Amino acid sequence: MPEIKFYARPAVPIEMHKVKIVQKLSLLPARERLKSMYEAGFNTFRLHNSDIFMDMLTDSGVNAMSDNMQSAMLRADDAYAGSETFYRMQKKLEELFGISNLLPAHQGRACEHIIAEHLVKNGNCVIMNYHFTTSKAHVTRLGGHVEELVRDEGLIPKSQNPFKGNIDLDKVRACVEKEGAENIAYMRMEAGTNLIGGQPVSYENMKAATELAKSYGILTVLDASLLQDNLYFIKTREESMKDKSLREIIRMIGDLYDIVYFSGRKFGFGRGGGILIRDEKLFHDMEDLIPMFEGFLTYGGMSVKEMEAMIVGFEETMDLDVISQSPQFIRHAVNTLDEMGVPVITPAGGLGAHINAREILTHIPAEEYPAGAFVAALYLCGGIRSMERGTMSEERNLDGSEHISSVEMVRLAFPRRVFTLSQIEFVIDRVKWLYDHRHLVGGLRFTHEPKTMRFFTGKLEPTSDWPEKLVEAYVADFGDDQ
């Protein structure tokens, strides 16, 4: 979609849809938010949704459906086995990716479980451009290890590099030489690398990396959960792709990989997932795991109504008007915050706007989770629920010490087609206020720490009375009712 031009003022992103159903929001008073934060153990995952004004925790399963998606749910074939809904989904995915073999699953991490369960053996290595929390956990649970081989510039917070998710081919060669090709279970590339700011991967890099892997006989896997945003960036940032349609680009990408899996909570706007497997034998070797862990082979733990909605969502992903709004809103937020002097990850990626907490909260030790502290503080300063993407999202080293993350970010996720621009402006304003009062924010420590993926259900406490001081400063500026 070309950006809409304005005559009398600077251009801003335009929503290419109209609202037909609304849900009321509420903004708790600041001192009530402080109480809620203590009750939630300073973990925004543990907040009640009724405590939240702007929910920017994730883009997973919270995207708005279109009218066509909702109407499609009425035609669902609610059969345990042989559902025609499944065959419609299979046909649509084959049309887009060129792979006919589909294993359904209830969401993306279930796909990761099935893939790892079949392919990863104790001592194996899995190459990734960058890990996602669940993708890594499934590998390490089985005794494997992950090698993250994103290019060095992918970890530079401020950059003009349009494809910071690209994998480093020289690092891949060195890894294969060190590990031995026979010990590498597969190479997983993640479109729109989540944990480094939703940064995309270029088609050129995907093609070169998959060709290199195949020259060693290494299986290639694409995590296509964030492919929608990545398609937008390939189309708009990669010169050789600008004249190609989204349908052409997605098919070219599909043709590169042995396995493509996705979370429908992101790709397709529904709640489910799937694994596309090119090789017929590999497909049959893996299919027994679906009835064991997910459901029968024609629903895989999904609601068939959601499957019908996703089929429409896959097709809507081929519409540039549909997939451009989220990246444009994110770019507006990132560029505005950057102009205000707030350290953000640039260039703007997909998924959400990412704030560089390591640079903002330099007075908080890494072991006291600066990004986690900023997330808690942002909720106190406006009822905005965001998510930590840093050391708290890592698992401890075997000796119990912290594994300090290479990035320390706060993710403000942008669920697709959910927020208006005025709501985004509110978030920008509160982030700026918090940045200007960053000296009031202190650290956190765990009081309940699960061994795996502690950021989901762990409980923390502040290392001082900094939340009370922050709230009093906020009330002094805005009053207690905001």
Image (cartoon, grey):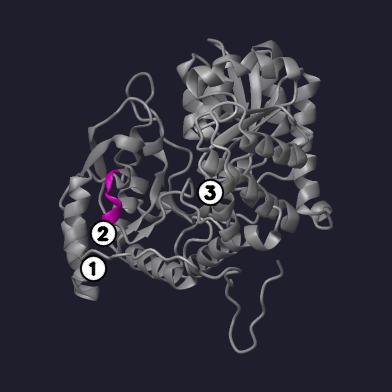
> Range of the magenta residues?
46-51
Q: Nearer the viewer, residue 15 or 145?
A: 15
Numbered marks: total: 3
- In this view, the mark in front (2 or 1): 2
Q: Which residue is mark 3?
A: 197
- Residue 420 is left or right of residue 288, and the answer is left
Identify the residue position indicated by label 2 in the image: 380
Q: Is residue 480 above or below residue 324?
A: below
Instruction: Where is residue 109? Give x, y as percent.
Output: 50, 31
Q: Position of residue 451 (x, y in %)?
A: 33, 25
Q: Residues within 10 Å of mark 3 (few under 14, many from 20)?
A: many
Residue at image coords 53%, 57% = 416
Q: CA distance from mark 2 to mark 3?
A: 23 Å
Residue 337 vertical position relative to residue 351 in the rendered view, above or below: below
Pointer 1 or 3: first along the chain: 3
Place of residue 258 in the rendered image (x, y in percent of width and height, measured from the top left): 73, 26
Q: Type of residue at label 1?
A: Tyr
Dot label at residue 474: 1
Residue shown at 58%/68% (left/top)?
17
Q: Are marks 2 and 1 in contact (CB under 8 Å)?
A: yes
Name the one closer to the observer, 260 or 152: 260
In percent of width and height, residue 435 lies at 36, 63
Check whether the beta carbons of the residues at disc 2 and disc 3 lie within 8 A of each other: no
SS state under label 3? loop
Can residue 226 be seen by looking at this rendering?
no
Which part of the image, by quadrant, shows the C terminus?
A: bottom left
Point out the tag, 2 or 1, that comes first from the N-terminus: 2
Question: On the picture, is 29 further left or further right than 93?
Answer: left
Q: Is residue 289 above or below residue 101?
A: above
For this rendering, which residue is in front, 387 or 419?
Answer: 419
In the picture, the disc for residue 109 is none
Q: CA distance from mark 1 to mark 3?
A: 28 Å
